Amino acid sequence: MPRMRVFYDHAEMECCGTPFAVGDRVSWRLVPTTREDGHHGAAAWVANHGGPERATTGRVLAIDLVHQEFLAHHDPRAVAPPAAGPGEVIFVAAGRALEPVPGAPALEAVEACPKWFDAFEQEEQPPRRVPYRVRRAVGVLVTLDVPGGTPTRPGDPRRRLRGQ
């Protein structure tokens, strides 16, 4: 059977995905990717919200956790806000903007896909400089053994031939 690589984004899994392990038979709605999609070289990605009506079924042969490194841009005043005087209100920025570091994804072979990915986050604590680095698990790359090969694109002639 043909093998294909599928990207399962952490947000798709955490929202309404079901964890799986190597050896499991899965059935997912897959959307083909292009080189510009940024799905870490996968041929398709899992679309729990939308995607094709028909699911692709296959057996999980391997799972790689995808770690991405980011530059976190943070307002330094949010780390150590200034003290307010009597009757003063000080508004301080909260949150951060994450910028992917090009070429930084790293793969880690795992036996099962986690439901929650925040346990894999690593960050400089406390942030001593701006920007600082954050490493997060952004999803998994799954190697599937698929009977039908790759998913077809809408309007693809193979789609009509296979009755999809």
Image (cartoon, helix red, strand yellow):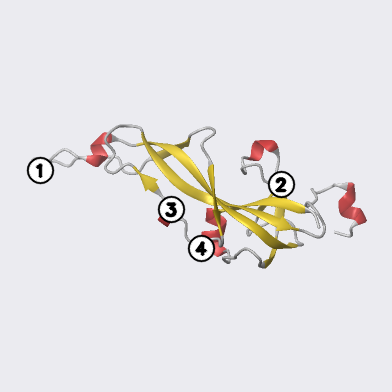
The residue carrying mark 4 is 115
In the image, 37: left or right of 88?
right
- Badge 3 is on which residue? 120
Tag 1: amino acid? Gly
Residue 91 visible? The answer is no
Marks 2 and 4: CB-CB under 8 Å? no
Of the numbered discs 1 and 2, the one sitting upstream in the chain is 2
Comparing 138 with 104, the one in front is: 104
Identified at 61% across, 42% down, the residue is 40
Query: How dense is the environment of label 4, judged by Cα within 10 Å: few (below 14), some, or many (20 and up)?
Result: some
How far apart, in angstroms, are the residues tagged by discs 3 and 1? 42 Å
**Of callouts 2 and 3, the N-terminal one:** 2
Question: Which residue lies under the disc numbered 1?
Answer: 87
Amino acid residing under circle 2: Ala
Q: Mark 4 or 3, which is nearer the eye?
A: 3
- C-alpha span from label 2 to label 3: 25 Å
> Of 162 and 122, which appears nearest the observer?
122
The structure residue drawn at horizontal position 73% and vertical position 51%, both measured from the top left corner, is 4
Q: Which mark is residue 43?
A: 2
Q: Residues within 10 Å of mark 3 (few under 14, many from 20)?
A: few
In front: label 3 or label 1:
3
The tag earlier along the polypeptide, 4 or 3, is 4
Could you give the CA–CA distance between mark 1 and mark 2, rounded to whole angstroms?
59 Å
Q: What's the amino acid at mark 3?
A: Phe
Secondary structure at numbered mark 3: helix
* Left or right: 73, with 86 as reference point: right
> What amino acid is at disc 4?
Lys
Quadrant showing the N terminus: bottom right
- State the separation of the CA atoms marked 2 and 4: 22 Å
Q: How many marks?
A: 4
Query: Is there a contact, CB below 8 Å, between mark 1 and mark 2?
Result: no
